[in-house]
Amino acid sequence: MKSKISIIVGGSGQLGISLSKLLLNKNQNVVITTRNIISSKKKISFKHKRLRLFKINVLKKKRINFLLKKIKQK
């Protein structure tokens, strides 16, 4: 069975970081989207092999499609 993948939009805030930690503890893969990847890397201090961070504007349909294809490949 494939493991679940959770996508957290705007996950660099306090709620997103807390949710991602909770999901990682439940052995789920987590994808966090953010507008500013540099400041997000500073906020998200934990490293995990099941955590991926993407800079994306969620208002752009093409970028969302790209993200979903990228996630499916892995």
Image (spheres, grey):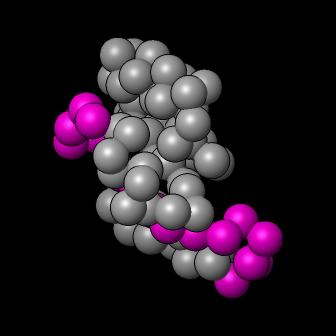
Q: Residue at x 44, y 70 (%)?
A: 70
Q: Which residues are magenta?
A: 45-62
The quadrant in which the C terminus is found is: bottom left
Horizontal and vertical percent position of residue 29? 39, 38
User: What residue is at 55 percent from the left and 57 percent from the top?
Assistant: 34
Say above or below: 22 vs 4.
above
Q: Quadrant of residue 66?
A: bottom right
**Front in this rendered view, residue 68 or 41:** 41
Residue 52: within the magenta? yes
- Residue 14 on the magenta span: no
Examine the rendering and report whether any part of residue 2 can be seen: no
Among the 4 quarters of the image, the one containing residue 2:
top left
Name the quadrant of the N terminus.
top left
Residue nearest the viewer, comparing 32 with 5: 32
x and y percentages locating residue 9 in the rendered image: 64, 48
Q: Is residue 48 above or below residue 37?
A: above
Q: In the image, is residue 31 above or below residue 73? A: above
Q: Total number of numbered labels?
A: 0
Q: Give the left or right position of residue 59, taking residue 21 as reference.
A: right
Q: Nearer the viewer, residue 29 or 41?
A: 41
Residue visible at 45% across and 17% down in the picture: 22
Q: Going 74% across and 78% down the picture, which residue do you hit?
A: 60
Q: Is residue 42 left or right of residue 33?
A: left
